[in-house]
Amino acid sequence: MARIKWTRDRIVLEIRRLHARGERLTSRRMGAIGLGGMVTTAYKLFGSWRAAIQAAGVPEPESEPHRWTLERITNEILWLAREGRPLSYAQVRKTNRALVDAAYRHPALGNWERALQAAGLEPDRHQQRKRRTRQSIIDEIRQVSGRGEPLSFAHVRAQYPRLASAAVSASQFGSWAAAVEAAGFDYDEHRQRRRWTRERILATIKRLHAAGQPLNSAWLGRNGYGALVVAARRPGMFGSWPDAVECAGIDYEQARRAGLQASRSLTGGVVEPDQTGSRGGNDRGGN
């Protein structure tokens, strides 16, 4: 599409046309509908945008402190969408800050995400992808570990591909091992999940029980011990989770009832998982 060459006559005619269709003739509005170039040229040819409006012989836009109704906000967003304009918060704030500010001020909205939802759009489709920094990568690695998940590259690449990709990029750490080390962990301890043995399963169950942690499989699965339960159920191990608990010298039914009660109120103090991340299921069952 050829770039419009704005002249005095052309600007006057366009202002009159916009006025006739009910557009609000502010410079901000002109920028929002793609006529910022006309306003810029008007300053050069008329001295100001206000002078250009006066030359067109149409009323100047009146100040309307409360003009941003919910309908106007959503219509403005839908117009931007139809024009194919980016609708991320950062992009719209650059080109139409008044619209974003209005969305935040409106009592029915309060933020840009709800404004997009009110316009019938999906906010996730219009978010600007966050650029990861070395510090944000370190923070995410610590969050993954804090949830009891393993820090092996295989696990993170499968569960958090964007994090893994960002960490190994040449502009960041260059390798996953370097990123994990930068986050304060010994990567050699995380690079490969240790194999579950009967002795290790029993020792982990006893450790959890001694720490007062619930021993029902659902709670364990939600808190990073799913692999323990899965390993215990294998035919070559104990065949079921209750049998594994009993072999550890613990009354399973008593522990299960106590665990159900404790899991309703337990919100912290979880024993750190032994580098396991799978989720558990029902207490009785196969692999």
Image (spheres, rainbow, N blue to C red):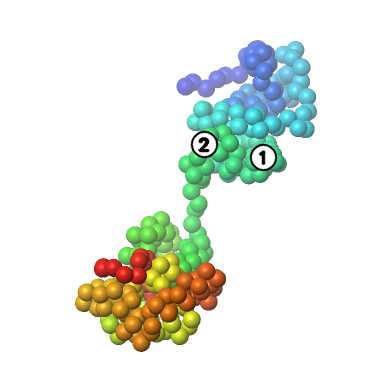
Q: Image quarter for residue 202?
A: bottom left
Q: Nearer the viewer, residue 68 or 246?
A: 246
What amino acid is labelled 1 in the image? Ala
Q: Image quarter for residue 250?
A: bottom left
Q: Which mark is residue 287?
A: none
What amino acid is labelled 2 in the image? Leu
State the residue position of label 1: 108
Q: Nearer the viewer, residue 282 or 94?
A: 282
- Does 104 appear above or below 239? above
State the residue position of label 2: 121
Callout 1 secondary element? loop
Residue 205 at x, y = what percent? Answer: 38, 81
Q: What residue is at 56 percent from the left and 30 percent from the top?
A: 78
Q: Is residue 109 visible?
A: yes
Quadrant location of the C terminus in the rendered image: bottom left
Neighbor class of circle 2 (other Cα within 10 Å; few <14, some 14-19, many 20+) is: some
Residue 228 at x, y = what percent? Answer: 34, 74
Q: What residue is at 68 percent from the left and 28 percent from the top?
A: 27
Ranked by sequence position, the earlier of labels 2 and 1 is 1
Callout 2 secondary element? loop
Q: What residue is at 35 percent from the left and 66 percent from the top?
A: 282
Instruction: Nearest to the eye among marks 2 and 1: give it.
Output: 1
